[in-house]
Image: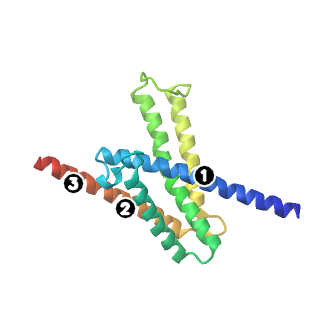
Amino acid sequence: MAGRAFALALGIGALYSFFANGVTWALGCNRAMAEAAAEGEFPALLARQHPVLGTPIGAAVVLGTVSTVVLLLYGLLAGTNEDLFWSLFAFSAVIFLLPYILLVFAFARMRRLDPARHRPFRVPGSNGVATIIALVCALVLGMSIVLFVYTPGEGMQWPVAIGAIAVMVIGEIVIRSTEMTRLRAAAVG
């Protein structure tokens, strides 16, 4: 009985953590998307903000819409609730981990190209240490992504892999489309 109660408490704590972190991640993503859209890197719709609060409404609505579509698509592919949860969890983890691989390499590159710049936090050591740190971080992130896409004993998680590739392709299409629109506007104006 005590083991069952502990497992239930642990499950509730894990779900609370997922929801609490999901909100902060979504808010951070919305803010970053709105800033990029305000700079002309994404469609202007994503830059719309609440007139009083300054919160990114356009990005939040698009995120909610895309999340709903993804949830429905994965719901059609999943056989059970457990499959649905795992597919969505693995998919979102892959999507959130991929940019960090590029960020750790950007850290090492910026450290090498602009070593004199004042930064609020500085990792001690030489550029070689920074490169080793970046490689280790990228390796851990890469292995994590592989384990979300390929589960030992079960094989490839094709919905996760296809979903991640589709999101990256769609993202690149949106970015290129926005760049072309900006270039056309600059040529006319």
Q: What secondary structure is found at the residue carrying circle 3?
A: helix
Left or right position of 3 against 39: right
Q: Earlier in the sequence, mark 1 or mark 2?
A: 1
Instruction: Measuring from the top left, give residue 26's x and y in whole percent.
Output: 50, 52
- State the quadrant of the N terminus: bottom right
Answer with left or right where residue 138 lies relative to residue 56. right
Number of the label disc, if any, that sits on residue 181: 3
C-alpha gap between disc 3 and disc 2: 16 Å
Give above or below for 41 relative to 131. below
Residue 172: which quarter of the image?
bottom left
Please name whichever residue, 123 or 125, is drawn nearer the observer in this view of the structure. 123
Q: Is residue 149 visible?
A: no
10 Å crowding of disc 2: few (<14), some (14-19), many (20+): few
First in sequence: mark 3 or mark 2? 2
Q: Which residue is mark 1?
A: 20
Q: Residue at x 61, y 67 (%)?
A: 85
On the image, numbered disc 2 is attached to which residue?
170
Q: Amino acid at mark 3?
A: Thr
